[in-house]
């Protein structure tokens, strides 16, 4: 999850609600004068206008009042959540809450379906958002720093053994079709800061979240392009072939390296690849692999690298 996404800012009036979510509880105002439940939080009852309010815990049980499915992110930072199932949930107490449905396929969602709360801890400070899912679902939202596991089906792909002296088989690898997606890695602010120290590139658009939010074109800090490129070595793409029979293999450089779109701090990235060309030269076989790195959910790549591998 991108850490540049806009987060709620608790106020004096709403702080009990957000603090309750941090503790895994839903607390909303209740009018002791007329018995009316209130949401969003106010200083007074919106029915009888009394100021005799107290915060009470509720179960969060309710039903979907209305919903919509969005497929275009309002900000690039939300690309990893597409499509979003946005909904208004009506709690059993009668109040309605704007929220996001999780753990549900699109064809499972119905107006009037019963739902239960899911507490989504989104930040190191314990900030928590309230989501909902079906009453028959068991959803736990985790935000690991690194998600390095390949999907089992892709990790188990058999790999063809292709000898480096088999020109016909090597040429057959050239394709316009990309491999499946790799594992995913989270590029958080701490990783960006470490790279800034290592590289000496501490430009504020990478290292100063507050200034980047106010002055930057992306609504927050972004990763260095070079950092995203370097992390390709940790992205395991499910290629279905392996070149064999060589003595040495070298990373010979790049024919093309581009950074078409930013990677906001906190984004998850993954990659896919295709063999772009194979050429036999005096020193051996030169294979060009096009690597595309994307923010998860984004159509436009963040890095395009035509990596040249030399087999000798």
Image (cartoon, rainbow, N blue to C red):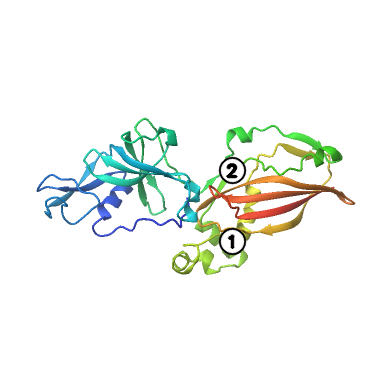
Q: Residue furthest left?
A: 33
* The one of 67 and 51 positioned closer to us in this rendering: 67
Mark 2 residue element: loop
Of residue 105 and residue 137, the one placed in the foreground of this image is 105
Q: Is residue 114 left or right of residue 222?
A: left
- Residue 215 percent coordinates (x, y): 47, 69
- Lower position in the chain sequence, tag 1 or tag 2: 2
Neighbour tally class for label 1: few under 14, some 14-19, many 20 plus, Cα within 10 Å: many
* Structural distance between the alpha carbons of marks 1 and 2: 20 Å
**What residue is rendered at 85% in x and 40% in y?**
167
Q: Quadrant of residue 109?
A: top left
User: At 27% across and 50% down in the image, what residue appears?
Assistant: 17
Tag 2 residue: 183
Which of the two residues, 36 or 122, is positioned nearer the viewer here? 36
- Extreme residue toward the right, this view: 282
Residue 108: percent from the left, percent from the top?
A: 41, 33
Question: Do the numbered discs 1 and 2 sit on residues whose CB atoms are within 8 Å?
Answer: no
Q: Along the horizontal axis of the image, is 245 left or right of 49?
A: right
Q: Position of residue 137 (x, y in %)?
A: 39, 32
- SS for tag 1? loop
Name which quarter of the figure residue 227 lies in.
Answer: bottom right
Which residue lies under the disc numbered 1? 224
Between residue 268 and residue 304, name the one nearer to us. Answer: 304
Residue at horizontal 10 percent and vertical 46 percent from the top: 34
* x, y percent for residue 95: 23, 44
In this view, 73 is above or below 237 = below
Q: Disc number at residue 65? A: none
């Amino acid at each position: 999850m991108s850490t540049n996404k806009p987060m709620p800012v608790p106020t004096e009036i709403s702080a009990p609600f957000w603090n309750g979510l941090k503790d895994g509880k839903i607390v909303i105002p209740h009018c002791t004068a007329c018995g009316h439940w209130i949401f969003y939080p106010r200083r007074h009852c919106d029915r009888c206008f009394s100021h005799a309010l107290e915060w009470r815990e509720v179960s969060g049980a309710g039903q979907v009042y209305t919903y919509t499915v969005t497929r275009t992110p309002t900000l690039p930072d939300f690309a990893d959540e597409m499509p979003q199932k946005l909904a208004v949930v009506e709690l059993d107490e009668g109040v309605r809450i704007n929220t996001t449905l999780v753990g549900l396929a699109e064809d499972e969602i119905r107006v009037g379906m019963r739902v239960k709360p899911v507490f989504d801890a989104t930040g190191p400070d314990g900030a928590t958002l309230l989501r909902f899912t079906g009453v028959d679902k068991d959803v736990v939202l985790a935000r690991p720093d690194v998600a390095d596991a390949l999907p089992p089906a892709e990790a188990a792909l058999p790999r063809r053994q292709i000898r480096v002296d088999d020109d016909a088989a090597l040429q057959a690898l050239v394709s316009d079709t990309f491999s499946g997606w790799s594992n995913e890695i989270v590029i958080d602010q701490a990783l960006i800061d470490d790279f800034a120290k290592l590289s000496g590139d501490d430009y504020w658009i990478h290292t100063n979240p507050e200034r980047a939010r106010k002055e930057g074109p992306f609504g927050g800090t972004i990763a260095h392009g070079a950092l995203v490129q370097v992390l390709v070595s940790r992205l395991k793409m499910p290629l279905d072939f392996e070149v064999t029979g060589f003595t040495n293999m070298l990373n010979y450089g790049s024919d093309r390296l581009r950074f078409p779109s930013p990677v906001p701090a906190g984004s998850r990235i993954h990659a896919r690849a295709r063999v772009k060309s194979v050429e036999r030269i005096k020193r051996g076989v030169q294979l060009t692999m096009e690597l595309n790195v994307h923010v998860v959910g984004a159509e436009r790549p963040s890095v395009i690298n035509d990596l040249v591998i030399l087999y000798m």
